[in-house]
Image (tube, grey):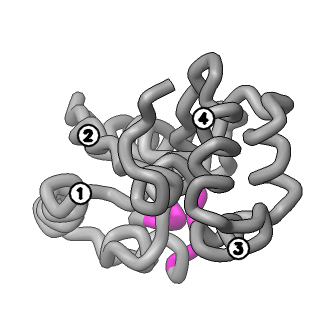
Amino acid sequence: MGRRVPGSPTIRLSDRDRAWMRKMRAEHDLNKKQTAASIGYSELRYGAIENGRASCARMVLFGALNKLYGTDYVPEHPKPVPYRCRETVGIPAGFGQWMRKRRKELGLTQRQVAEKIRYSVAMYSAVELGDAKRVGWRFMKGITAIFGPCTA
């Protein structure tokens, strides 16, 4: 039962879920080793999950625990964690020309601007030429800091 099911996300369990695991184990007078063996986990892995040091496929785990304990406990839905690195922004029409114009007005080279916003010169150039369709939030934040609000 401890095997990962394709498509089931692995996450760290909430304090509430881990407290329920400990409570049920105590109510059924089981130790970690017995519980782990009953649901097909190693004692070490089960202990790490219960103590919050490891993630797991929670629906698989709680399905096995509910079957073991004869309950129908529903684990907390995980709160989404913002992952800003993956957030992208569409580039508006005329943005590249506006960037080029502002860069020339300030007397900067593409390399200087790219270094200031901590992006590669190739990426900066692609945006300025209109070859890029989307950029990360950090790119837009850096451009706004250097050039000011976009007037394109």
Front-most of 137 and 12? 137
Label whose residue precedes the other's in the sequence (4 or 1): 1
Q: Which residue is mark 4?
A: 98
| CB contact under 8 Å: marks 1 and 2 | yes
Residue 66: assigned label: none
Circle 4 crowding by C-alpha within 10 Å: few under 14, some 14–19, many from 20: some
Q: Main secondary structure of the magenta part?
A: helix
Residue 14: assigned label: 1
Of badges 4 and 1, the one in the foreground is 4
Please indicate, yes or no, whether residue 109 appears anywhere in the rendered image. yes
Q: Which residue is mark 3?
A: 112
- Horizontal and vertical percent position of residue 136: 58, 46
Q: Residue 30 occupies which quadrant of the picture?
A: bottom left
Q: Which residue type does callout 2 highlight?
A: Pro
- Horizontal and vertical percent position of residue 67: 38, 36
Q: Secondary structure at mark 1?
A: loop
Horizontal side of 136 relative to 16 (left or right) equals: right
Q: Which residue is mark 2?
A: 75
Residue pictured at 19% horizontal, 67% vertical: 22
Label whose residue precedes the other's in the sequence (1 or 2): 1
Of badges 4 and 2, the one in the foreground is 4
| CB contact under 8 Å: marks 4 and 3 | no
Horizontal side of 2 relative to 140 (left or right) equals: right
Using the numbered discs, state the Cα–Cα distance from disc 4 to disc 2 in whole angstroms: 50 Å
Residue pictured at 82% horizontal, 49% vertical: 125
Circle 1 crowding by C-alpha within 10 Å: few under 14, some 14–19, many from 20: some
